[in-house]
Amino acid sequence: MNKTIQDNFNNLEQKAERFIRQTAVKYFAVGSSSLPDKGGVIMVSLKKGKKKERYLSVDFTNSLRNELQTKRAAFIASYRGNNIIYTEGKGVRFVDYSESLQYMKDNCLLRFIVEPDVKERLALTAVVSTIIYRSQHKRSYIKRVKTGKTANDLSK
């Protein structure tokens, strides 16, 4: 591989790891006006205990502020009046809208990074997603790589 390409990828991977490790803020505590109206990458996760997180989404956007407003509006619109199901390690629970909203307010975390270059945003999103996938599916991912099997092959 070309040394310049390898160096660029290594720099991008380091930037992605710093982004993942940056201190998260409570998702609903951040006012959308406090986010810059600039392009970047935004990541949403749920707290699971004191140190663990379950990553929900990683997206690149032309406006961090608008992305946050859109995600909040989508959450409210999609869950209003419905029972939802989520897992807490003890199985499945049915909850109403107000309980799910409170759960999200208490446990949802946000990270964002400003990235003016569109191609860098896309690349950073891809690398962050890959790192997260590997960390959350480490055993099955390593097994698939070693055996050359797909996730469907292993589930049979």
Image (cartoon, rainbow, N blue to C red):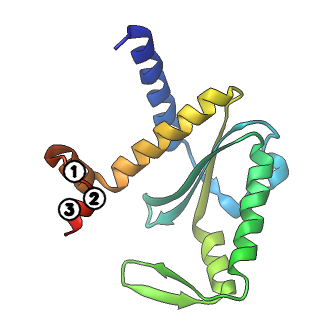
In the picture shown, does residue 5 fall above or below 24?
Answer: above
Q: Residues within 10 Å of mark 2 (few under 14, many from 20)?
A: few
How far across and how far down the image is residue 122, in percent?
59, 35
Q: Which residue is mark 1?
A: 144
Assign the N terminus to one quadrant of the image: top left
Whether residue 21 is visible to the viewer of this picture, yes or no, is no
Q: Residue at x 44, y 15 (%)?
A: 5
Q: Residues within 10 Å of mark 1 (few under 14, many from 20)?
A: some
Q: Residue at x 62, y 28 (%)?
A: 119
Q: Earlier in the sequence, mark 1 or mark 2?
A: 1
The residues bearing labels 2 and 3 have C-alpha atoms spaced at a distance of 5 Å
Q: Residue at x 57, y 68 (%)?
A: 107
Q: Mark 1 near mark 3, Cβ–Cβ under 8 Å?
A: yes
Q: Which residue is mark 2?
A: 151
Q: Mark 1 near mark 2, Cβ–Cβ under 8 Å?
A: yes
Would residue 36 be found to the left or right of residue 155 on screen?
right
The residues bearing labels 1 and 2 have C-alpha atoms spaced at a distance of 7 Å
Would residue 124 be found to the left or right of residue 116 on screen?
left
What amino acid is at disc 3?
Leu
**Disc 1, SS:** helix
Q: Nearer the viewer, residue 42 or 27?
A: 42
How far across and how far down the image is residue 156, in percent?
19, 69
Q: Mark 2 near mark 3, Cβ–Cβ under 8 Å?
A: yes
In the picture shown, does residue 95 fall above or below 135?
Answer: below
How far across and how far down the image is residue 57, in percent?
56, 55
In the picture shown, does residue 143 fall above or below 99?
Answer: above
Q: Earlier in the sequence, mark 1 or mark 3?
A: 1
Whether residue 3 is visible to the viewer of this picture, yes or no, is yes
Q: Nearer the viewer, residue 4 or 104?
A: 4
Q: Which residue is mark 3?
A: 154
How far across and how far down the image is residue 4, in percent?
44, 10
Q: Residue at x 46, y 61 (%)?
A: 54
